[in-house]
Amino acid sequence: MTDDPNRSDGPYPGATYAAAGVDTAAGDQAVALMRASVAATMNPAVVGGVGGFAGLVDVTDLRDYRRPLLATSTDGVGTKVAVAQALGIHDTIGQDLVGMVVDDIVVVGARPLLMTDYIACGHVVPERVADIVRGVAQACAAVDTPLLGGETAEHPGLMRPDEYDLAGAATGVVEADRLLGADRVSAGDVLVAMGSSGLHSNGYSLVRHVVARAGWGLERHVPELGRTLGEELLEPTRLYARVCLAMLDTLSSAAAPPTIHALSHVTGGGLAANLARVLPPGLVAQVDRSSWLLPPVFSLVRSLGQVPWEDLEATLNMGVGMVAVVDARGVDAVVTVAQGAGIPAWVLGEVSEAADRQVLGRLVAGTKGVDGGAVDIHGSYVTG
């Protein structure tokens, strides 16, 4: 028998990659459609262009660091993708991805150097993939982070043709003696909250469960939200990287320790759980629920699903997307920088010695596997 690649033995046509459900031509078309969006994120440090096996970035500037530390983070956007798929709107979910990944890098004081993304789908629809990547690229450009590489994988038989999921990873750098974290936090520090743009990208399994049980459609106009339910649920995650780096630059001094001691990105687990991660043992953060007006979407989820307050605030951000733990002398500057960037900011509470304070509300500690401090979240939410 000759090994003829054009020969098919038997009565049926030979198997092909296309017959198995993978369209490589569609993949190439998707890359062509996204090329301009990705190229727009490149900065002078990027070496080469789009389409290589690996992205390259020139790190010559790291020679000026005394002790550079690389920071890395990876994440996805959870079941919020189901909302995007249901609405057929795919160009905003990318901002959620960038917010979840890059803002985790900034928490340690690191400046992002690059980001990569990964999209898995049941079937490559070039325009849809290009929309997703365009959203990622626009958000990367907004925080001055090159989208240095990515991958689109077609998984027929594993995912339905209209299904997709996306994930990303980022790398940043921080000077070792400028690293933010629990070891810098002390009693007397002040908590400055930065407002969220809505639900962001966490807790959507709860939210979607509540909505489905209530029988509400995404097209339903909700008066207290001032728009449709779908528009509210698809609101992109607010990006904090640029403003947090601006705060660090504004308040930094080579001769003095950082005024901002820690940052907490409020993602899965809610405000108290994430804040506890950046506190040292023996300290407690007092968070006053009455210090801000609870955005309507959180009250809506609670009332629509009869969700207990404790479960709600252990799942959702409750209107706070980032918290800066600041030396009292830097509070006004931090608030000014945030508000100048269009981000609401306010004093959320303060840090004290655990032994000196009576617990006033719900005490949260030992979250995310971190043996750190605690958060006493107390008072009542103010609703409109």
Image (tube, rainbow, N blue to C red):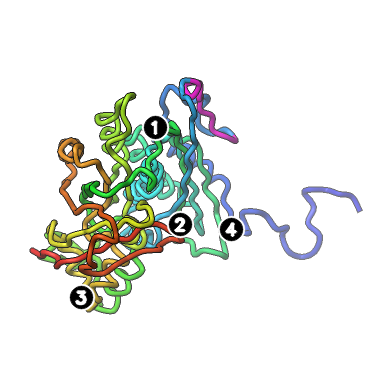
Kind of residue at badge 2 = Asp
Q: Position of residue 220 (x, y in %)?
A: 19, 68
Q: CA distance from mark 2 to mark 1?
A: 22 Å
Name the residue located 30 percent from the left edge and 36 percent from the top edge. 242
- Mark 3 or mark 4, which is nearer the start of the sequence? 4
Q: Nearer the viewer, mark 4 or mark 1?
A: 1
Q: Nearer the viewer, mark 3 or mark 1?
A: 3
- Mark 1 or mark 3, which is nearer the start of the sequence? 1
Q: CA distance from mark 3 to mark 1?
A: 41 Å
* Circle number at residue 41: 1
Near-viewer residue (345 or 282) = 282
Location of residue 223 (image quadrant): bottom left
Q: Is residue 134 visible?
A: no
Q: Quadrant of the N terminus?
A: bottom right
Residue highlighted by disc 2: 165
* Mark 4 surroundings: few (<14), some (14-19) or many (≥20) residues within 10 A: some
Near-viewer residue (113 or 16) = 113
Q: Secondary structure at mark 4?
A: loop
Q: Position of residue 324 (x, y in %)?
A: 27, 45
Name the residue located 36 percent from the left edge and 64 percent from the top edge. 365
Give yes or no for residue 57 being in the magenta stretch. yes
Residue highlighted by disc 3: 304
Kind of residue at badge 3 = Leu
Kind of residue at badge 1 = Thr
Residue range of the region highlighted in magenta in the rendering: 53-63
